[in-house]
Image (cartoon, grey):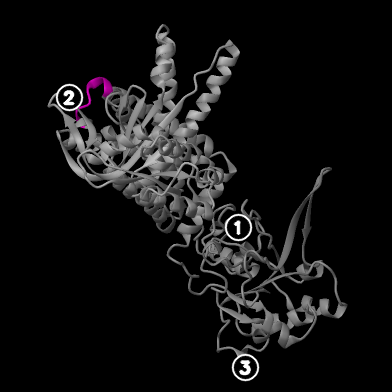
Amino acid sequence: MRTEHKPRQAGLDGGQAGSRRLRLLVLSLTVLIAISLLSRLPAWSLLELRSFDYLSTFDDPRPPEGGPVIVAIDEPSLADINAQWPWPRSLHAELISQLRAAGARVIGLDIIMAEPSNPGNDAAIAKAVGPDVVLAGDETLIETPQASQLIRATPLPALTEAGAVTGIASIDLSGDGIFRRIPGYEDGFAAMLAKASGAEEAEILPAGRLIQSFGPARSYPTVSYYQALDPENLLPPGYFKDRVVLVGLSLQNAPEIDKGGVDAFATPYTVHTGKLVSGVEIQATIYDNIRYGLSIAEARLPAVAACILIAVLLAAVTVWRSTGWLTIVTSAAALLAFVAVSFAGIRLGHVFVSPLGPTVAYIAVAFGQAAFDFAEERRNKRQITRAFAQYISPDLVRRLSNDPSQLKLGGERRTLSVLFSDVRGFTTIAETLKDDPEQLTGLINRLLTPLSDVVMDHGGTIDKYMGDCIMAFWNAPLDDPDHALHAVRASLAMQAAISRLNGQLEREAAALGRKPHVLKMGVGINTGECIVGNMGSTRRFDYSCLGDSVNLASRLEGASKNYGVALLLGEETARLVAANYTVVELDRIIVKGRTVPSPIFTVVHKAGAQALAAHEAFIEAKYAGRLAPPDAVFDKLAADIPELASYYAIVRDALTEGGE
């Protein structure tokens, strides 16, 4: 991602700048169209409503002063009254009388009384009700494949004839099961309570507006049913005076959302608490929203579209010249502003403008353009890397592109693991193909390509190609703590790659009816201190390494055929990989410039502990000059360690010829 102060961005020519701005314009239009389509999806609407849940409850609003009081049919009341539910209606009649005597202005019973019960109890409740009592009704839509049927349950005619008011207590839930809107009933329970309490008809707001929730469950003043039956003795004086009182089921402990509950529903506060709210408390919330004008209207489509357009324009201005760390800061500020404006609309104007559309629009434009810029910068970098990687290591190209100051002659002392590989007998193969240079070149390419891939896949840097020989090293230019292990793994993978290539060549030769070229490779690896860096002239140089450790690695590769093995390791390399591979000593050689012999090793894969111990004894006897060609140890070890059979044969032949 490019920052604004970089001269490269500021120095775009007219064609590049025009192309970028055209792309930004297309991106902005695409975002507008995409959000217009997405906003029609039900899932989008639910996401907007979920943002409303958080914003409308952010400052933890509480019920208005003087609002409804809840008389809860709860666990203590069930225990105190000790009667089977539903309780006799004469008990509700007594409650109405007590509440009216205590000065309640309006009484709402969120209890369905649509079916007759005991005649005496029905007569008692009919005698107790009046215009100041609102009784709950229910409306249910039953849908079947054949038809849709609307069933409305209302209080007994005797109760309405006695003056009681009917209010439909059914509520509407959003697609995610959360209650958020004023129910769509002109005779809704809370609306009838508001009318009965003296609200003018004009104050009853249209259905469908969003509800302002007031705290979690039990946020409203609540007393138990049994306390309301005896308010003089069990409640403070004047507790119900001039108050709207709602009676209904309300459990002492709000049920959790995943367990459900009787007449309990999820509200916007459920996103914080995970608790459901009782139906009677929801009716109190609807009442306060209607009576005090606290419900919230949703912004109309033109206003929403204008906000999204403004967000797109702001994002386009932010990334007009460039993208970088300032884009992130500006974007964060813009997104906070969208949320703040939406919250202010809820609190100050009772209008909800969802921040979802503007937020998504801003992010899509700003970070979409940032992604384009980043991709273009990466593409330019890759082009440079591809161009220069033909001459120097791609790792070095990346390192130099990140730090151009390293583009100079010089080096550093580092411990490297250096690998040399060479195809044995390739000169003979080349001689047989001297009249077919295309086939020879193709064979070299088919050989070097998989071997090079193995080196780079294992984190190595290819220093150079010398005909069919590859020189590579590990732990430069990038640090590699396990450089010796990676070098040895690469050498084994190279042998596997050679075997696969031989299989291909054998099949191709069989198809053409000719003898295949069998490739065998020797590898030498040594670990030690080297000088590594940019070496050459002031006009042309390469990233390479030199030192005695490099010379020993080269000598190990050349000597591998003399010991009948494909891989020879220096002493330090063997020590570093001994925990991962079984390494065995083969000999001690004197490197040019040194007087102390250096032990050399190889890797074996199938050797038991006894065989390894016997090999160590064999090496000691070899150094001490105690071996003789007839010794049975040669055949025994060749059988126990088949990988070293050629090595034992070479040692025996050398003894037979009288030289070591």
Inter-mark Cα distance, 3 to 1: 39 Å
Amino acid marked by disc 2: Arg
Which residue position holds label 3?
Answer: 233
* Residues in magenta, as a range: 10-16
The residue closer to the viewer here, 469 or 34, is: 469
Judge whether residue 36 is colored magenta.
no
Secondary structure at badge 1 equals loop
The residue closer to the viewer here, 247 or 393, is: 393
Q: Position of residue 513 (x, y in %)?
A: 59, 11
Badge 2 crowding class, 10 Å Cα cut-off, few under 14, some 14 to 19, many 20 or more, is: few
The reply to whether residue 523 is in sight is yes
The mark nearer the N terminus, 3 or 2, is: 3
Amino acid marked by disc 1: Ile
Secondary structure at badge 2 equals loop
Q: Residue furthest top?
A: 435
Q: Position of residue 532 (x, y in %)?
A: 22, 39
Indicate the quadrant where residue 419 lies: top left
Mark 2 against mark 1, which lies toward the viewer? 2
Which residue position holds label 2?
Answer: 540
Badge 1 crowding class, 10 Å Cα cut-off, few under 14, some 14 to 19, many 20 or more, is: many
Where is the C terminus found, in terms of image quarters? Answer: top left
Q: Are marks 3 and 1 in contact (CB under 8 Å)?
A: no
Q: Residue at x 33, y 28 (%)?
A: 382
